[in-house]
Image: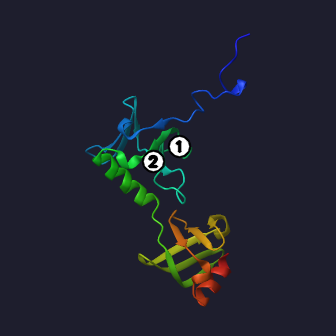
């Protein structure tokens, strides 16, 4: 009896196997209208690719997943050593990552108003004052260790509170209201 390859046999098939990409196999560019493209191993071109850090907090620059634009995001491979991409590709990817992973660091909570379960906060951050609308706060908080949290606002922006214990008393009290 011949042994099957694939999910039924427990062996990975081409659909589930991770494809690792080297920088010389990937080219990222924009067309004359500004649309983003990524060519992978001269086999396919992805329209509006997203670049996701596989370990965004612990090892942000080691691997990037190249995925499609839809919410499910078809995975086209893991790019290793992305900083070795050609200059144009590297600059574009770096810009996309900076935009996607921009996390202003919260130094102080200036104000917090609750409107029927929607919190409107004004944060003093390392990038100046920011107003954030927080819906379903408990569903949009990520705890990173004992005292670090990321808050995601209604627009998908993240705010990094590196050390809750280091906040002033008024900021801690306001944060406790929404958490």
Residue drawn 57% across and 84% down?
167
Which secondary structure, mark 1?
loop
Which secondary structure, mark 2?
strand
The colour style of the image is rainbow
Q: Is residue 80 left or right of residue 87?
A: right
Q: Are dots 1 and 2 in contact, CB under 8 Å?
A: yes
Q: Quadrant of the N terminus?
A: top right
Q: Quadrant of residue 28?
A: top left
Q: Position of residue 126 (x, y in %)?
A: 43, 77
Q: Is residue 41 left or right of residue 171?
A: left
Q: Quadrant of the C terminus?
A: bottom right
Q: Is residue 20 left or right of residue 171?
A: left
Q: Residue furthest top?
A: 1
Q: For mark 2, does the 10 Å Cα neighbourhood hold few (<14), some (14 to 19), or many (20 or more) residues?
A: many
Q: For mark 1, does the 10 Å Cα neighbourhood hold few (<14), some (14 to 19), or many (20 or more) residues?
A: few
Q: Quadrant of residue 21?
A: top left
As drawn, 63 above or below 43: below
Residue underneath mark 1: 73
As drawn, 79 above or below 60: above
Q: Position of residue 112 (x, y in %)?
A: 58, 82
Q: Residue furthest left?
A: 32
Instruction: Say which of 89 and 140 sits in front.
Output: 89
Dot 1 or dot 2, earlier in sequence: 2
Q: Position of residue 129 (x, y in %)?
A: 44, 80
Q: CA distance from mark 1 to mark 2?
A: 8 Å
Residue underneath mark 2: 50
As drawn, 41 above or below 103: above
Residue drawn 41% across and 60% down?
99
């Amino acid at each position: 009896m011949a042994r099957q390859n694939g999910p039924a046999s427990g062996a990975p098939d081409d659909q589930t196997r991770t494809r690792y990409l080297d920088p010389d196999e990937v080219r990222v560019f924009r067309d004359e209208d500004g649309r983003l493209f990524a060519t992978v191993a001269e086999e396919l071109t992805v329209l509006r690719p997203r670049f996701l850090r596989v370990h965004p907090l612990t090892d942000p620059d080691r691997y990037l997943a190249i995925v499609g634009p839809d919410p499910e995001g078809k995975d086209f491979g893991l790019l290793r050593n992305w900083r070795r991409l050609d200059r144009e590709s590297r600059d574009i990817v770096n810009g996309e990552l900076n935009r996607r992973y921009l996390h202003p660091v919260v130094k102080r909570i200036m104000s917090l108003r609750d409107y029927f379960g929607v919190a409107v906060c004004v944060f003093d951050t390392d990038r100046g004052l920011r107003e954030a609308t927080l819906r379903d706060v408990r569903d949009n908080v990520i705890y990173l260790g004992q005292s670090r949290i990321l808050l995601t606002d209604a627009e998908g922006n993240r705010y990094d509170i590196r050390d809750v214990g280091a906040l002033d008393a008024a900021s801690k009290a306001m944060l406790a209201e929404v958490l």
